[in-house]
Image (spheres, grey):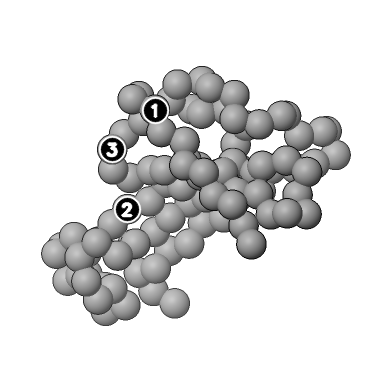
Amino acid sequence: MQEYIIHECEAMPKNGCAIEGRQTPSDAKRIWQLFVYHEATEEDLEESHYLEQVGEFVWQAILEINHCPYCGCELTQTKSASEKPEFNYHDFRSW
């Protein structure tokens, strides 16, 4: 079972991003991730046959972070030099 926490701050945009912390019972510390995304509009639906409805993700980038890029709040301890932050990018306009 994973425990999720959402970081919210006034400086963060209301749309297009979210910051989430997750921790499993076996994890010693919480991992925080910045999700940056674009939700489909009518225009996006016309350009891609893979998108089906307004509001679904067109693309998303997920970056592991230690501090909130909007308010500067420290979210977790800094990783050691041997630990590399993870990131992913997904484009849902085609397969």
Residue farthest right in this picture:
82
Locate the C terminus and report the quarter of the image it occupies.
Answer: bottom left
Q: Is residue 68 left or right of residue 75?
A: left
Q: Could you say whether the residue bearing mark 3 is in a helix, strand or loop?
A: loop
Say whether residue 63 is visible. Answer: no
Say whether residue 86 is visible. Answer: yes
Q: Give neighbour class at mark 3: few <14, some 14-19, many 20+ (Cα, 10 Å).
A: few
Along the line of sight, which residue is nearer the eye, 33 or 26? 26
Count the marks: how many? 3
Front position among marks 2 and 1: 1
Rendering quarter of residue 42: bottom left
Q: Could you say whether the residue bearing mark 2 is in a helix, strand or loop?
A: strand
Residue located 64% across and 62% down the image: 1
Q: Is residue 32 left or right of residue 11?
A: right
Disc 3 marks a residue whose amino acid type is Lys
Please tell me the numbered disc located at residue 14. Answer: 3
Please tell me the numbered disc located at residue 9. Answer: 1
Q: Position of residue 33 (x, y in %)?
A: 55, 44
Disc 1 marks a residue whose amino acid type is Cys
Upstream in sequence: badge 2 or badge 1? 1
Rendering quarter of residue 76: top right
Residue located 22% across and 71% down the image: 53
- Kindly report the distance in space between the C-alpha atoms of the residues bearing marks 2 and 3: 12 Å
- For the residues bearing labels 1 and 3, Cβ distance under 8 angstroms: no
Q: In this view, does 79 lie above or below 49?
A: above
Q: Position of residue 23 (x, y in %)?
A: 65, 49
Upstream in sequence: badge 2 or badge 3? 3
Q: Is residue 26 above or below residue 49?
A: above
Please tell me the numbered disc located at residue 38. Answer: 2
Upstream in sequence: badge 1 or badge 3? 1
Q: Could you say whether the residue bearing mark 1 is in a helix, strand or loop?
A: loop
Front position among marks 2 and 3: 3
